[in-house]
Image (tube, helix red, strand yellow):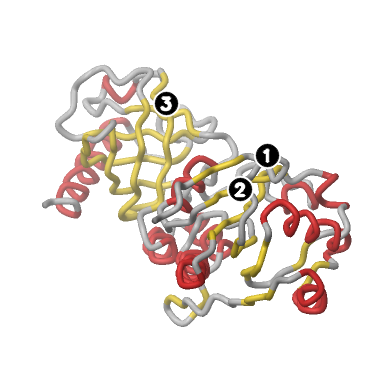
């Protein structure tokens, strides 16, 4: 009988102790490399008749260790957990990464995993956790026989265009606006979600009303430019031309994400929209006049309609 899927927010939660195969990592983006490792772990756990589990950290360890600021994440924590759940994992643990976890001795952390989960196998790629990153592969392989677990080091062999798929690559491609590469690495379309808020309503005055999204301030945005997207409102999908940028022709300022939905004229304020990025059209630029901007937007809309036609 399949296990009931469980999600918990800490290793310190009261977790039912039972033999467990565990995949350990940050898994930001849950890209195709992550999917491969976790998929193999889930299959192995099923074959062995034990529970499959993923332990992921939030905030991302690099945010804490290197004090990184600004936008960094490929997806929200909620989306990460949903994607991990979709891989068939029985137990998803999202543990807070802070100075206490950073400074814990690797053996103490492994002891906790064995005590709480009854860990029988640990899966991952380039292991290095605990104080001064002492919990590496060789450390785990030495400790395993004593503690009753084995180690499965699975370096992701997933490649795209001859280069390995990684979270770093996805971040770099997002910064470059290379949505084809981003989506290829993710194995799905990159998405942004946000509540529709009031902007300056300038788009309506030039004939192209837009939904201005308030997105999470820590999630990465694609490079400034215009994209062919799908806008999801609940279970309804609408083609949309989406601009990411500072709108230099109108007023400039902070970066915004605004979408012009086709064949939609209802009030969207306060609703959540999920944008699915499909194609990159062009970079953002400053036009000589509003008329020139309107002409370009008409061309953008026509191109999006062509690219996303059923």
Q: Say if 281 sits above or below 198 in the image.
A: below
The spot of residue 102 in percent (x, y) is: 83, 52
Disc tally is 3
Q: Quick one: 248 or 21, which is closer to the camera?
A: 21
N-term mark: 1 or 3: 1
Crowding at dot 1, Cα within 10 Å, few <14 / some 14-19 / many 20+, comes out as few
The spot of residue 277 in percent (x, y) is: 35, 49
Cα distance between the residues tagged 2 and 3? 27 Å
The quarter of the displayed image where residue 123 is located: bottom right
Q: Most extreme residue toward the left, as rendered? A: 310
The quarter of the displayed image where residue 254 is located: top right
Query: Label 1's element?
Result: loop
Front tag of 1 and 3: 1
Is residue 186 toward the left or the right of residue 153 in the image? left
N-term mark: 2 or 3: 2
Residue located beneath label 3 in the image: 195
Query: Label 3's element?
Result: strand
Cα distance between the residues tagged 1 and 2? 9 Å
Residue located beneath label 1 in the image: 13
Residue located beneath label 2 in the image: 93
The spot of residue 15 in percent (x, y) is: 64, 44
User: Is disc 1 in contact with disc 3, using a CB cutoff of under 8 Å?
Assistant: no
Query: Label 2's element?
Result: strand
The spot of residue 151 in percent (x, y) is: 68, 75
User: Is disc 1 in contact with disc 2, using a CB cutoff of under 8 Å?
Assistant: yes
Crowding at dot 3, Cα within 10 Å, few <14 / some 14-19 / many 20+, comes out as some
């Amino acid at each position: 009988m399949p296990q009931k899927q469980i999600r918990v927010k800490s290793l310190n939660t009261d977790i039912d102790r039972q033999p467990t195969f565990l995949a350990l990592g940050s898994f930001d983006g849950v890209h195709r490399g992550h999917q491969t490792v976790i998929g193999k772990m889930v299959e192995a756990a099923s074959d062995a008749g034990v529970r499959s589990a993923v332990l992921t950290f939030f905030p991302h360890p690099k945010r804490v260790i290197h004090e990184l600021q600004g936008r960094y994440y490929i997806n929200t924590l909620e989306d990460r957990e949903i994607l991990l759940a979709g891989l068939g994992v029985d137990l998803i643990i999202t543990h807070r990464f802070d100075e206490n976890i950073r400074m814990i001795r690797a053996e103490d952390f492994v002891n906790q995993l064995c005590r709480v989960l009854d860990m029988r196998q640990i899966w991952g790629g380039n292991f290095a956790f605990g104080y001064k990153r002492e919990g590496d592969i060789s450390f785990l392989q030495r400790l395993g026989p004593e503690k009753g677990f084995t180690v499965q080091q699975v370096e992701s062999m997933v490649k795209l265009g001859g280069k390995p798929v990684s979270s770093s690559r996805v971040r770099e491609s997002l910064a470059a606006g290379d949505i084809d590469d981003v989506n290829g690495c993710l194995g799905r379309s990159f998405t942004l979600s946000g509540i529709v808020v009031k902007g300056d309503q300038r788009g309506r005055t030039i004939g192209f009303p837009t939904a201005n999204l308030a997105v999470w301030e820590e999630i990465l945005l694609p490079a400034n430019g215009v994209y062919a997207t799908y806008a999801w409102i609940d279970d309804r999908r609408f083609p949309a031309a989406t601009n990411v940028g500072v709108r230099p022709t109108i007023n400039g300022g902070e970066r915004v994400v605004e979408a012009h939905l086709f064949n939609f004229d209802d009030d969207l304020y306060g609703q959540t929209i999920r944008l699915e990025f499909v194609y990159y059209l062009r970079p953002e630029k400053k036009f000589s006049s509003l008329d020139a901007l309107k002409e370009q937007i008409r061309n953008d809309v026509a191109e999006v309609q062509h690219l996303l036609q059923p």
